[in-house]
Amino acid sequence: MITGMHPRDEEIWRAIDQGRRAIDWEAWFGCPEGAGYLSPAGHQVTARAVAGLTAFFNSRWLPKAVVPSPAPGRASDTFVGLGRHAPVLQFMDGAAPGAWVEAVRWWAAYAYLEEAAVPGIASVKRDARCDVTLSRFLHSQTQARLALMGAAHGLRVELEPAKASGGPGDVRIGPVFIEVVTFAEDQKFQDYERFRENVRAHLFALDRGRDIYWEGDLPELLSGGDFETWKKRTEEAAQQCAALEAAVDVLSSAGRRLTVHPGTAPQGTTLTGDTVESDQGRRLLSKVHGKCAKTAGAGTAWIWVEDHSGLFHFPTPFAEMSLAAKTDALADLLGPLLAEYVHVAGIVVSNAARRRLPLPPNEDALRPAAQGFRRGLPLDRVRETIMIPRRILLPEQTSLIARMCDAEANALDWALGKLGVPHGVASLLADPSTPQRVSPLWTP
């Protein structure tokens, strides 16, 4: 059964699942009665965020983003995993406050940039609405986040600035011209993630009306008749567990064990996915190399890589390295591109996949050829950013980007203040002094 979700939200999401209602931002955030972690000011901000995100993306965007396309070959256009980041679905393990703050950050960045009439924000909005794909969403989010970070430092910012060779770039912050690259999972990761979403939806449906929960291993990637057979076995296991009030195991053909238990899931219960291997370093090098070549006519430019569970995807060896080791590794991998492309002032790789409370202390890794930053962001995100600058040539620009990375955690409170929320994130939570236990949303 669903535990911890408000009955009204259960009803809404059941209607969405059955196709009787389209998903919208109001359902995505959840009803106020179910968000007990928010203060009255937090509930007011939720209402503003729902209205603001609906207006920015339009009402048709979210259903397109999270509902798989029926057209052959178009399944990868949908945002695999976006729906599960909805605050209303993070009622287990105390993850809802962090998911809510992240969604508010999306709204606050767009709302501030529109209110401040930052040049180019209309183009970003148009592109985000027209290109309903994960890569475009990440691209637009990164443009807005970087612009907000620059504005918070009192710098003039511009979105979609003109290149020296004509055509738009991505962001200009003071004298710094930035081109954004999004780096997500390769097709193998996407295929398995999509399969895993289907598995979760199936198990979620089996929970309805039964006092049961699941833990253990999700199956390896199954298709066609193999997947249907596995689903039938889980249906039988759920029925048997509910009838006998006893745990029942379901084994996949590869021996992965999923267990259904009677009762309510204890805190910390997890489901573990399969491990999909890929040479992410080679993929990253190829993608950045291509971006360097395409921006040759842009004049002096920084390449900003926003990593979305690509290189930093757990449990890759790179993800488990220390910050200093990651910094050295990326400098070795990407540094030679600076010699090949003299117009590139530097390369930045950034990722905020980790979620942790309490947040770890800030960490810097000042290495011979690069600099790494690890910063905790409100409320439970850990961002790691590695900057590989061209040596000596542009020390002022390098210093500017370093200051932005150092103080990114303050940007949201600054934006909220500009939007009439003077006391920042802390004022929006019912009990901000009490840390919430947060586990990874869906760790493979």
Image (cartoon, helix red, strand yellow):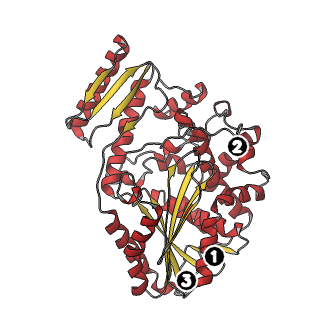
Labels 3, 1: front one: 1
Q: Residues within 10 Å of mark 3 (few under 14, many from 20)?
A: some
Kindly indicate whether the residue at mark 1 contacts the one at mark 3 (C-beta within 8 angstroms): no
What residue is shown at x 41% (from left), y 44% (from top)?
443
Q: 431 and 362: which one is in front?
A: 362
Q: Residue 323's spot in the image, x, y percent?
A: 47, 62
| Residue designated by label 3 | 163
Residue 376, placed above or below residue 219:
below
Q: Amino acid at mark 3?
A: Lys
Residue 421, placed above or below residue 251:
below
Q: Residue 103's spot in the image, x, y percent?
A: 60, 49
Q: Residues within 10 Å of mark 1 (few under 14, many from 20)?
A: some
Q: 378 and 360: which one is in front?
A: 360
**Which of the labelled discs sits on residue 292, or is there none?**
none
Q: Is residue 293 visible?
A: no
Q: Secondary structure at mark 3?
A: loop
Q: Residue 272's spot in the image, x, y percent?
A: 36, 39
What residue is shown at x 49% (from left), y 44% (from top)?
83
Q: What is the spatial separation of the Cα atoms under label 3 and label 2, in whole angstroms? A: 38 Å
Q: Amino acid at mark 1?
A: Leu
| Residue designated by label 1 | 400
Of the two numbered discs 3 and 2 on the same chain, state the one appearing first in sequence.
Answer: 2
| Residue designated by label 2 | 47
Please give left or right for residue 432 compared with residue 76 in the image: right
Q: Residues within 10 Å of mark 2 (few under 14, many from 20)?
A: some
Kindly indicate whether the residue at mark 2 contacts the one at mark 3 (C-beta within 8 angstroms): no
